[in-house]
Amino acid sequence: MAILLQAKDRLLSRLKSLTKIQLKQRFNHTLEPQMCREMCSDSFNQEVDVSNWKTVDSRNLGITRAMIPQPSWVVLKILKSQGFQAYLVGGCVRDLLLRRVPKDFDVITTANLKQIRRQFHRSEIIGRRFPICRVHIKGSVIEVSSFETVAKHGEGKETVLLSQIPYGCDEIDLVRWRNSIHRDFTINSLFFDPFLNKIYDYANGISDLRCLKLRTLIPAYLSFTEDCARILRGLRIAARLGLSFCKDIDTAMHSLSSSIERLDKSRIMMELNYMLSYGAAESSICLLRRYNLLKILLPFHAAYLDQQAGKITAENPMMLMRLFFNLDKLVSCDRPADYTLWVGLLSFHQALVSDPQDAFLVWVFASVLYHGKWKEGVKFARDRAKEPVKFVPEISGFSEIESDEQLAVKVTELALSVQDCVNDLTKASSGYVFVSKKIERNVQQIFDVLVNSIESYNSGKRSHIIDYDMLGKGNLVETRFVLGKIILKTISGGLVAGEEEIDEEEMPEVLDKDSVENYLAKKNRKRGLQPSSAELKLKTAKKCKWTEKFSSINHELSMNKEDVVPKEEVEEIHKAVKNCQLPDEELKVRTTEKHKWIENSCHFDQELSINEELVPKEGSQQLGEETQKAAKTCQSPEEEIKVNPEKILEKKDRHSLSTEGTNKKRDKQKRADDKKKNGLLLSSLFKEK
């Protein structure tokens, strides 16, 4: 009996211990993100490790004030003038370090949001969890955040005492560091002070940029649990910059991909628009599919990609990826599109997959959108749509429809099918819905011109140049034009109207200097960057003019080398004549010397007036009259030689005689002065003795 009681007690004790372990594990799993942040917060009250803190001169990394747009610079200067600290922060610093064009320039300051709003007339505070102040200035919107916002979220946990500040840093260092540890990724935690030209790095963000690595500031699982929007943001940054993921990020994204369904629909739309409208749509689609997010956001297109994955070949590419590839070639961070463009592309592709169409019909559909005119679009399609289009299952074949009336009916049916697919994106039956009814209406308006009175449609663009300002604002005419251009490029694999020939020649494999220069020169000629014929004639005339001038100088110098210029300068002018190229400063010097020489050779009467005893008065007067005539006609010495060489030679002989006489007279006077001076000195010495 005693043995049974002992066994029972042991069993109960084991059950109790197992229950405690399970409860502890569940408790820790629930509070793990919060505890991690509390640990980070508590580090303020403990010793702060400043060994990883770095301050770098931005000029050594190639970043200067000139890279900051004027609106952002004005905001920074106004805040600084009011006694606040102000920095550029986040993605703009990251992109500048990578020599990329930033999407926007965000500012953070020590002023609170109310103080920021008082400094700018056109500004408003938005946001609930992390409010910011949007400043409207010079046609741009600058997002300005406050260090105080993050401090309030950690109130009661991050009390900093001046006595606890580590050696080697000040209070503003701790303010910046505290803000940096609450950010998503290390490469987004950099601060740039353009007034001091300093970049502050508290989490080895610059090192991660050099390695092109994406790393979270806290463990990735905890970071994505705290804010699942960081998953989409991480994919967007990696797709645009070509970054690799750390192992913990890769694992966490696979585990927590379904958590994005908890995000607000407008936030999903914003993040997806950043992915697809800023020049990284193709790579973003690939990453969304890799981490099972495309099945949640765009289930139809995810199923299409899964189905086509094993069938993809060089002869049979995926049309969806080709559409986004051509979209990326037209837009970028500094020239983004509106969401209506990529939603329209998705709807168009879904309509073709659901009901495959004839290639000629797709040609006409895209051409009318591109030209903005029914007749011109049909004519362009009939002239160009000759080769077969190899997209399966989107294209069913090729058969040119002869009747324009029948063609108009079929194009209208395709446009209605596309509008239905836009409607499908807003239905709950299609899965997770993030496209609003307002977006649906805006996208459907793009295709209204192909539904209502299509044969009288004649209101497109006048030029084939993209207006990126209007495209970014979602202008219907501009969006139709670009949408048609992308489809035409996809099905033709080449040019559309208004474009130059594509240079098929690739960059030379051996990148020696000559081959690269020849390649670039050839591309520049094709792009029309070479000077026009009129410019070439002007340059040739100038070159000949300078050649004549310097050859005349060379000829005259050869006649009087010793009297005019040294031998070294004659050799330099020989080189200049040979190359026909001189820097501006040298040209000025040479031109000045040439004018001096002409003055010396033309105005002999000044020299002759000094040496009247060497030349008779009658001869001097005659020679003076001749030189004045030469000066009036502005004839160069070379031209005078051609007209009357004997006369010029006679002048030269007289000039050399006058110069020789002047030199002898000066030497005689100098010897007399020296003798007199020496005599005075000797007499003075004699008197002293």
Image (cartoon, helix red, strand yellow):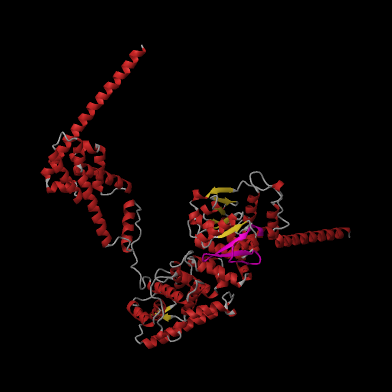
Measured as percent of width and height from the top left, residue 186 is found at 58, 55
Magenta highlight on residue 138: yes
The correct choice, above or below, for 478 with respect to 140 in the image is below
Magenta segment includes 121: yes
Task: State the residue in front, 163 or 591.
Answer: 591
Horizontal side, residue 277 vs residue 612: left or right: right
Q: Is residue 243 left or right of residue 5?
A: left
Q: Point out the stretch of residues depicted in magenta.
A: 120-148
Please say if 201 is above or below 321: above
Which image quarter is the N terminus in? bottom right
Residue 479 visible within the image: yes
The foreground one among 136 and 254 is 136
Q: Position of residue 32 (x, y in %)?
A: 69, 59
Q: Residue furthest top?
A: 689
Give the residue displayed 26% in from the left and 58% down from the top. Answer: 538
Which picture quadrant has residue 663? top left
Where is residue 81? Give x, y as percent.
58, 55
For the question of whether residue 398 can be seen, the reply is no
Q: Position of residue 521 (x, y in %)?
A: 31, 58
Lateral position of residue 364 relative to residue 344, left or right: left
